[in-house]
């Protein structure tokens, strides 16, 4: 069982690599090195702040785009191209396929993030010529970004399990944008009255709260992150991804592959 | 123990915007295929052949009915380790090479690493792809993909193989090779269930066939039984460029090809014809009863189905 999930995950990773998904690293490297050089020339004393902000935001955006655009095709493309037929006619359970796909995509994003993190630290070293202890906080921001990717991957897979790639992309991206403003939505729900309060509260807690994962700005200002937040975000991301994956599995288990 | 036992499997899709309109793709199907048999599932395009195979593979879910494969419930994952499947017009992960694809499928089928390595090499050799083992599948022709498809279906040495239109897209040489392969599988004692609309393939390979049309099974039987309906006529072939007057007197239509003459006569005229040929010192080559061809049987079943449907309408 675990072996089959691992084989499917490794094949998904191989597909991403062979389809040149990791080429985005080149664009990322160009963006970051260009920004570092430019910032070094035009800003005084805030070079580091700008590089951390820009670098981590780029890591997050590049990853989310990859997660959505690969994730939405993970199931639907396999159905459309009928590659799934020869997989599911083997002793592979449908849930193993979904979980394998999830881990494959998550693995791709972790590797991608690892290389982008090297880019961020290189750019940081270029502008500040040294590392200080507070720079280690960047690792926490990167960890939160990876947790964010897990949620996005699971959502993309969920939509991919019943919808077309185009609609899945729209759903996943919309949910990502709304999730970035989840705190505002919760504040609005607290202020609302009557039916709209119930509706807004429900929506606020249903959408993924990505704003809780965004610690880029505070880390750029060398503010520490509470251990409680790390634990909370970890549990929240794992729970949310597990729920979305369960939904994907449940839908896919009963889906006719016409 | 039958290799396949289909017990009233049926499938109705819901179509239309609100998915309320039912569309029956397969009427309750009852069918048994014995172990070691080569069974041909015949029918025109859209008859329900692929739906049946997809139901048996667990790719679509039945509206009613069940099936047993190799003595177990068809949904049992253990069954799938013992079956191979080639879908119609297969498409594979085109970023993989033939070797990588077979390796991957071997992993999914649970073939142990040592055995897998050996089997992959054997299969690449068997389907004639050893020289292109390292080429990505995106560079493969349709025929080569079909070979990969056949290879992946038999890679894990299954007891039962399902082929959906295995000859589709193959040139005459490719078709011949697939036929040979199927004969080899039969020789190895495997059960082969294949769908096709090419009747000559079925006639050449199958022990038994089933004919399906508009989602309904119209007839099942051994090829020999289906084609054994003697129409009360015999075919007489003899050597000679001329037609003896005594044969002409029987009112028989004769066809001359080179120095061979072929005539189809009524069974009760057989002795008179032989006597006439002896008298004229003609060399008799063959006398064979005229049998209904599989094609004639197939067309008759389809026409009968259409007539019945027309009457009901």
Image: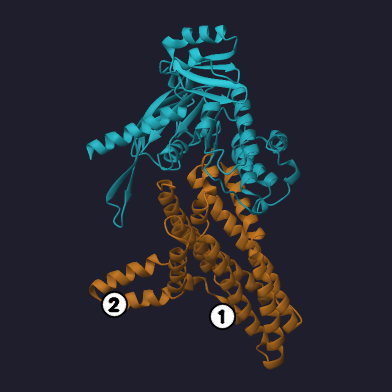
- Residue B123 placement, left or right of B272: right
- Please report whichever mark, 2 or 1, sits nearer to the chain's N-terminal start: 2
In the figure, the shade used to draw chain A is orange
Q: Is residue A66 above or below residue A249?
A: below
Q: Is residue B193 visible?
A: no
Residue A97 vs residue B14, the one in the foreground: B14
Chain letter for mark 2:
A
Q: Position of residue B103 (x, y in %)?
A: 67, 42
> Where residue A125 appears, x then y in whole percent?
74, 79
Q: Kindly identify which chain the residue marked by label 1 belongs to.
A: A
Which chain is cyan in the rendering? B
Quadrant occupied by the N terminus of chain A? top right
Asked whether residue A14 appears in the rendered view, the answer is yes
> Residue at 33% across / 75% down in the picture?
A189
Placement of B179 over or under A109, stated as above or below: above
Question: Hey, which quadrant is residue B168 in on the image?
Answer: top right
Identify the residue under disc 2: A192
Count residues near mark 2 (Cα–Cα under 10 Å), then give few for <14, some for 14-19, many for 20+.
some
The answer to the question of whether label 2 and label 1 lie on touching residues, with beta carbons closer than 8 A, is no
**Which element carries disc 2, helix, strand or loop?**
loop
Q: Secondary structure at mark 1?
A: helix
Tell me: residue A185, above or below residue B179: below
Instruction: Name the residue that disc number 1 marks.
Output: A217
């Amino acid at each position: 069982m675990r072996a089959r999930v691992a084989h499917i995950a490794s094949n998904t990773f191989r597909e991403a690599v062979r389809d040149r998904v990791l080429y985005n690293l080149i664009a990322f490297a160009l963006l970051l090195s260009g920004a570092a050089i430019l910032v070094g020339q035009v800003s005084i004393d805030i070079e580091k702040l700008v590089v951390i902000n820009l670098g981590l935001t780029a890591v997050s955006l590049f990853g989310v785009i990859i997660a959505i655009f690969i994730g939405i095709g993970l199931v639907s493309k396999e159905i459309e191209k009928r590659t799934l037929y020869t997989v599911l006619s083997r002793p592979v359970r449908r849930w193993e396929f979904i979980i394998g796909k999830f881990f494959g995509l998550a693995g791709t994003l972790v590797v991608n993030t690892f290389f982008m993190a090297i880019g961020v630290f290189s750019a940081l070293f270029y502008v500040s010529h040294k590392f200080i202890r507070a720079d280690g906080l960047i690792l926490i921001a990167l960890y939160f970004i990876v947790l964010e990717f897990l949620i996005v991957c699971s959502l993309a897979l969920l939509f991919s399990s019943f919808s077309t790639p185009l609609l899945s992309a729209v759903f996943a991206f919309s949910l990502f944008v709304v999730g970035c403003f989840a705190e505002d939505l919760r504040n609005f729900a607290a202020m609302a009255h009557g039916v709209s309060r119930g509706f807004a509260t429900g929506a606020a807690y249903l959408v993924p709260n990505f704003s809780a994962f965004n610690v880029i700005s505070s880390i750029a200002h060398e503010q520490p992150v509470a251990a409680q937040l790390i634990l909370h975000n970890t549990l929240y991301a794992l729970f949310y991804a597990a729920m979305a994956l369960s939904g994907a599995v449940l839908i896919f288990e009963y889906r006719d592959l016409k | 123990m039958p290799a396949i036992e289909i017990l009233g499997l049926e499938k109705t899709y819901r179509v239309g915007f609100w998915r309320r309109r039912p569309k029956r793709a397969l009427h309750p199907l009852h069918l048994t295929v014995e172990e070691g048999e080569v069974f041909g599932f015949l029918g025109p395009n859209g008859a329900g052949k692929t739906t049946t195979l997809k139901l048996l593979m667990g790719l679509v879910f039945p509206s009613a009915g069940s099936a047993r494969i190799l003595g177990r419930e068809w949904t049992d994952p253990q069954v799938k380790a013992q079956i191979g499947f080639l879908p119609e017009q297969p498409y594979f992960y085109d970023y993989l090479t033939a070797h990588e694809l077979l390796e991957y499928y071997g992993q999914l089928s649970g073939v142990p690493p040592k055995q897998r390595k050996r089997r992959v090499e054997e299969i690449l050799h068997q389907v004639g792809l050893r020289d292109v083992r390292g080429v990505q599948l995106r560079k493969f022709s349709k025929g080569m993909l079909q070979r990969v498809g056949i290879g992946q279906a038999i890679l894990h040495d299954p007891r039962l193989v399902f082929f959906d239109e295995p000859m589709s897209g193959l040139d005459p040489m490719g078709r011949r090779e697939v036929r040979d392969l199927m004969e080899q599988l039969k020789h190895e004692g495997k059960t082969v269930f294949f769908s096709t609309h090419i009747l000559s393939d079925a006639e050449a390979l199958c022990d038994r066939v089933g004919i399906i049309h508009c989602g309904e099974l119209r007839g099942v039987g051994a090829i020999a039984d289906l084609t054994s309906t003697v129409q009360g006529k015999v075919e007489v072939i003899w050597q000679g460029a001329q037609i003896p007057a005594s044969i002409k007197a029987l009112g028989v239509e004769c066809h001359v090809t080179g120095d061979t003459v072929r005539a189809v006569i009524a069974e009760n005229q057989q002795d008179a014809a032989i006597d006439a040929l002896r008298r004229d010192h003609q060399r008799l080559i063959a006398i064979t009863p005229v049998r209904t061809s599989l094609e004639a049987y197939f067309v008759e079943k389809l026409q009968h189905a259409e007539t019945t449907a027309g009457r009901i309408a």
